[in-house]
């Protein structure tokens, strides 16, 4: 996937300091020609939604002077059967600026995995070994159209609409064999599954800004509404060795719908004693999940919900938030502090069983940033902030979902929000020492129900403490640097990191406490080759990581990116090689109190070659739109 994390935490994507209105799984398709540099903001202010990722990744776009019309076209294809591209257009006339964009992609992939599980408490089903071959085939598209209207020098308005769609099939065949505690074969079965997923999301966005006479004194209004439908269906056939002519047939269909309205009012005023910002945010969200399940009965010659898994679940939430921030510089000392108050009210109804639950959570999220500037090259900073992760709908739905033979998943309506408390000291980008304390951490855990059934459910763990240090050695030619690199070297960046994590918790008698460490080294080298070809080499190495419960294999990645601009730098041609060493394979071992589980996953054509181009019309700039989407409706599916 294209998931991005910093220190193991989710990030919020921005463009030039504003939330970037693009699905996360489209971010990898953003043309490199639009990007000047990327910065990571490790201490989001109280102005940001408390749930929008612990950290912020800010993409700084290249600036230009667009003519009355401008545009960009890009297309990429790779040997691992991924093709994606995009089109952006901009037309300015008078007080109006019209814009539109499209990004899309298609992928067709396969993967292989091998797993084995040992159940120490079972004499009959002691060992279960499985070989799986999976497949993925699908496309996605993202469309955006709108306009800006400059009423006068102090008043402006923006409106746009977006459409996001995807459709893909996901399937596979797995063959499993069961053995007793003497490793004598008991039975085997073959499982074939095929699933179809679709999503259609439509949104409207409006933004108004009022500037006052004093610089930086402004009032803004935002409104956002979205409607999302995510229907899916799947079919599973399981043939057991002792009854091969009568395989178990299972079908399911899910219809998930979500409607969201978000509005913001924000006010900024600079004063003689510093800058103050305040605002009010409102979020109203309704969701519904309709799950239908049926099995084929050979005796009755019909389909019926013999396991009583079908259910209808609705989940509503309202979030009211107020914030205030203060910032100023006192010579070389910078101060920014703020606090955000959020009240989350939830209501869930399992309409099939008549179960109801409600929740009301009022929380405060303080934020503090202190800095001392030694020089243009060195700055010492301290930051501390608090964030939250609210449970998604599938975490709280108490009904069971069938995952295949011998496995079920169910939500937990008693699960609570998880809170992140972060503290860090940094010396510019060179040294970063941090401590993250997470309470109420939740994740899916697996437990044995009986001899042959395993059960997955999300639970709150007691706590999770992470200690880490990052050493970064960036070097590039600049007047601030003590010496000059050879002209053919455009950039050198080396990062070495270490984290130690400790987790405490238990569930259904299973000890979930864990501890472990992770080390890594990332290097980037930029070169200017012959014939004005730019080359970038990326190398990542993560040694084998071990903890009390998990062991993950060593990870190594070497990738190369080559590009050349022609036609007065309007056309850029690029060639990249991903995972040149072809070493990306994931081997994870899990140690439980009464079980051992190992899974080895091999991605499809990890070593691949990609070829693409980007054509720019009149120095086209990517837009820097605001966005109110808090990410809680986003799908995790992607390429």
Image (cartoon, rainbow, N blue to C red):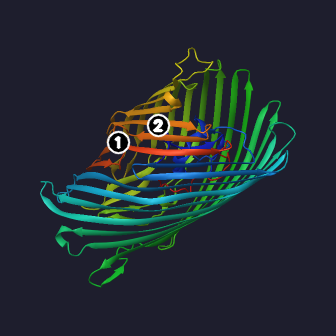
In this picture, residue 4 sits left or right of residue 262: left
Dot 1 surroundings within 10 Å: few (below 14), some, or many (20 or more)?
many
Q: Is residue 182 above or below residue 574?
A: below
For marks 1 and 2, give the CA distance.
Answer: 18 Å
In this picture, residue 496 sits left or right of residue 220: left
In this picture, residue 265 sits left or right of residue 443: right
Q: Nearer the viewer, residue 370 or 42?
A: 42
Q: In the rendering, at what x and y percent does residue 350 appear?
A: 50, 69
Dot 2 surroundings within 10 Å: few (below 14), some, or many (20 or more)?
some
Identify the image quadrant of residue 107: bottom left
**Which residue ends up furthest to the top in the rendered image?**
482
Q: Is residue 469 above or below residue 408?
A: above
Identify the image quadrant of residue 14: top right
Query: Looking at the image, is mark 1 or mark 2 earlier in the sequence?
Result: 2
Residue sitting at 51 percent across and 30 percent down? 531
Q: Is residue 151 above or below residue 502?
A: below
Please tell me the numbered disc located at residue 210: none
Q: Nearer the viewer, residue 158 or 442?
A: 158
- Residues at marks 1 and 2 touching, judged by CB atoms closer than 8 Å: no
Helix, strand or loop at mark 2: strand
Helix, strand or loop at mark 1: loop
Please tell me the numbered disc located at residue 584: 1
Residue sitting at 26 percent across and 83 percent down? 299
Q: In the rendering, at what x and y percent does residue 401 appear?
A: 40, 65
The residue at which mark 2 appears reads as 561
Q: Is residue 154 visible?
A: yes
In this picture, residue 121 sits left or right of residue 313: left
Q: In the rendering, at what x and y percent does residue 369 appear?
A: 64, 31
């Amino acid at each position: 996937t294209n998931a991005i994390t910093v220190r193991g935490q989710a990030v919020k994507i921005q463009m030039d300091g504003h939330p970037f209105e693009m699905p996360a799984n489209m971010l990898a398709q953003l043309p490199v020609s639009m990007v000047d540099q990327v910065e990571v903001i490790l201490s989001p202010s109280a102005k940001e939604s408390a749930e929008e990722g612990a950290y912020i990744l800010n993409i700084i776009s290249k600036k230009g002077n667009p003519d009355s019309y401008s545009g960009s076209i890009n297309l990429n294809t790779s040997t691992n059967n991924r093709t994606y591209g995009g089109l952006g257009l901009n037309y300015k006339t008078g007080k109006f600026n019209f814009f539109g964009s499209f990004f899309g992609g298609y992928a067709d992939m396969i993967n292989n995995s091998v797993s084995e599980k040992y159940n120490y408490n079972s004499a009959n089903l002691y060992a279960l070994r499985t070989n799986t071959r999976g497949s993925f085939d699908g496309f996605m598209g993202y469309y955006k159209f709108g306009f800006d209207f400059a009423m006068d020098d102090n008043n402006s308005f923006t409106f746009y609409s977006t459409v996001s769609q995807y459709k893909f099939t996901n399937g596979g065949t797995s063959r499993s064999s069961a053995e007793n505690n003497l490793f004598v074969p008991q039975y085997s079965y073959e499982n074939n599954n095929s699933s179809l997923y679709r999503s259609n999301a439509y949104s409207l966005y409006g933004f108004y800004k009022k500037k006052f006479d004093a610089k930086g004194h402004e009032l803004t209004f935002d409104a956002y509404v979205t409607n999302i439908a995510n229907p899916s269906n799947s079919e599973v056939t399981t043939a057991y060795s002792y009854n091969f002519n009568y395989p178990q047939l299972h079908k399911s269909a899910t219809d998930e719908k979500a409607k969201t309205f978000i509005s913001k009012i924000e006010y900024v005023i600079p004063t003689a004693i510093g800058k103050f910002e305040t605002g009010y945010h409102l979020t109203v969200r309704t969701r519904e999940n309709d799950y239908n399940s049926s099995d084929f009965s050979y005796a009755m010659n019909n389909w019926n919900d013999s396991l009583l898994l079908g259910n209808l679940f609705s989940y509503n939430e309202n979030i009211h938030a107020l914030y205030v921030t203060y910032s100023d510089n006192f010579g070389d000392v910078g101060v920014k502090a703020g606090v955000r108050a959020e009240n989350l009210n939830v209501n869930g109804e399992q309409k099939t069983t008549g179960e109801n639950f409600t929740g009301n959570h009022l929380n405060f999220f303080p934020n503090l940033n202190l800095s001392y500037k030694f020089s243009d090259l060195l700055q010492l900073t301290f930051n501390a902030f608090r964030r939250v992760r609210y449970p998604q709908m599938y975490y709280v739905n108490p009904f069971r979902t069938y995952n295949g033979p011998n496995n079920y998943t169910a939500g937990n309506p008693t699960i609570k929000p998880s809170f992140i408390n972060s503290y860090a000291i940094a010396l510019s980008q060179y040294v970063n020492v941090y401590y993250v304390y997470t309470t109420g951490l939740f994740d899916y855990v697996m437990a044995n129900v009986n001899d042959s059934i395993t059960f997955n459910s999300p639970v709150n763990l007691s706590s999770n403490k992470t200690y880490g240090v990052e050493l970064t050695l960036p070097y590039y030619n600049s007047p601030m640097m003590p010496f000059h690199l050879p002209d053919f070297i455009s950039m050198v960046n080396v990062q070495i990191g270490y984290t130690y994590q400790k987790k405490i918790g238990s569930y259904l008698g299973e000890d979930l406490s864990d501890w472990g460490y992770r080390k890594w080294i990332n290097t980037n080298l930029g070169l200017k080759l012959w014939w004005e070809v730019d080359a970038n080499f990326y190398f990542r190495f993560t040694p084998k990581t071990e903890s009390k419960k998990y062991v993950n294999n060593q990870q190594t990645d070497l990738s190369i990116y080559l590009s050349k601009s022609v036609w007065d730098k309007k056309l850029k041609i690029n060639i990249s090689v991903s995972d040149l060493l072809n070493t990306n394979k994931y081997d994870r071992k899990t140690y439980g109190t009464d079980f051992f589980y190992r899974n080895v996953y091999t991605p499809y054509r990890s070593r691949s070659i990609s070829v693409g181009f980007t054509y720019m019309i009149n120095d086209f700039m990517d837009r820097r739109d605001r966005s109110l989407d808090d990410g809680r409706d986003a799908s995790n599916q992607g390429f």
